[in-house]
Image (spheres, grey):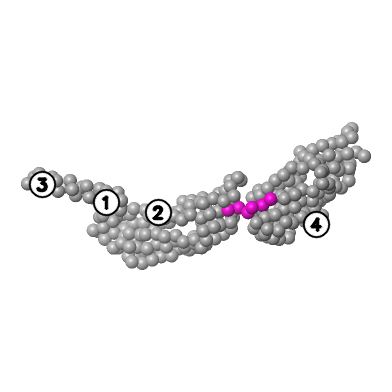
Amino acid sequence: MNVNKKWIFIVIALVLIPGILYFGQDSIFNFKKNPKISANVNVLTNKMLITNEEFGILILENKGKSNAIEIEVIETSPYTVTFESNPPIVLEKGKISNINFKVVAEKEVLKLSEIRKDIPLEFTVKYKNNEGKAMTPVKVKTRIQVFRPKFDIKKIDLGGVLKTELSLKHDQNGLLMIDIKSDEPFKGGEYWIEFTSDYPELEVESVDKYPSEKIYGGYKFTFQDQLPANKRISKSFLFKSKVSPGSYETRFTINIKVFWRDILLDQDNVKVVVLDL
């Protein structure tokens, strides 16, 4: 008889241990009528332009046998998430609670070399039963494809078909035209161009009179007009420089960078020669 009891206990253990590991103690030992929260997350889009704001809903449902209290929702992912409401103080058994949120993929989530990437949006839900005992946390996640605009500096016109450098006369203006193109539309004020050089005698002016500011090593011009999607647009600038004292010519390089919402989209270099003629 003792042998039979021994085998009965062994069989029970073999059933319970895997069950606890797979389903969790809240499911196996729910004789005390514990709460059991399930979670689901819905985002209005599965693709997100970097730095854009999108909306989603976190759905909590108490499928247990009693009320859940002290509910805490923790967002554990690279996104910036803002909840429009707090979790319910009490989630009664059989009830559902919807928590709206805003989600932003900040510029840091993509490396400069990455055009698009699937990034998980994950939440952890903690809660307790009526006696204040912590239940097994619930984790839920979805994946969103985050992408950056496909942007190119298409052409830099230096004033000639085969010209490889921008030629300037001492203290006189020279024209440089830049063609740009993006697969996403840009609003005015959201994108700009920077010209920098380690040669201090450099002046840059926008032909279209875009607002400018002096930055370290050069100039920044903020475009005020919209950049349509998939349309090549030309921008023109005037450059002026001086020959170094005692020289007939001076050579240096200008670095050109285009930004959108503080994100570097593309860059190029232009060689400059200034002649004292």
Report the side of 185 relative to 116 (left or right): right
Would you call the spot at circle 2 few (<14 residues within 10 Å), some (14-19), or many (20 or more)? Answer: some
Residue at the image point whose x is 88% and y is 39% from the top: 275
Report the side of 239 relative to 50 (left or right): right
Where disc 2 sits, the SS reads strand
Mark 2 vs mark 1, CA separation in Å: 19 Å
Q: Position of residue 92 (x, y in %)?
A: 34, 65
Instruction: Report the residue that reaches farthest toward the front.
Output: 161
* Type of amino acid at the residue the image marks with label 1: Gly
Report the side of 77 relative to 62 (left or right): right
- In the rendered image, the quadrant that contains the C terminus is top right
Q: Which residues are magenta?
A: 147-152
Q: Which residue is mark 1?
A: 19
Mark 1 vs mark 3, CA separation in Å: 23 Å
* Type of amino acid at the residue the image marks with label 4: Asp
Residue at the image point whose x is 90% and y is 38% from the top: 276
Would you call the spot at circle 3 few (<14 residues within 10 Å), some (14-19), or many (20 or more)? Answer: few
Q: Earlier in the sequence, mark 2 or mark 3?
A: 3
Instruction: Report the residue that reaches farthest toward the left.
Output: 1
Residue at the image point whose x is 76% and y is 45% from the top: 218
Mark 4 vs mark 2, CA separation in Å: 53 Å
Q: Which residue is mark 4?
A: 208
Mark 2 vs mark 3, CA separation in Å: 41 Å
Q: Earlier in the sequence, mark 4 or mark 2?
A: 2
Are the residues at dot 4 and dot 2 in contact (C-beta closer than 8 Å)?
no
Judge whether residue 202 can be spotted in this image.
no
Report the side of 199 relative to 186 (left or right): right
Q: Which residue is mark 3?
A: 4
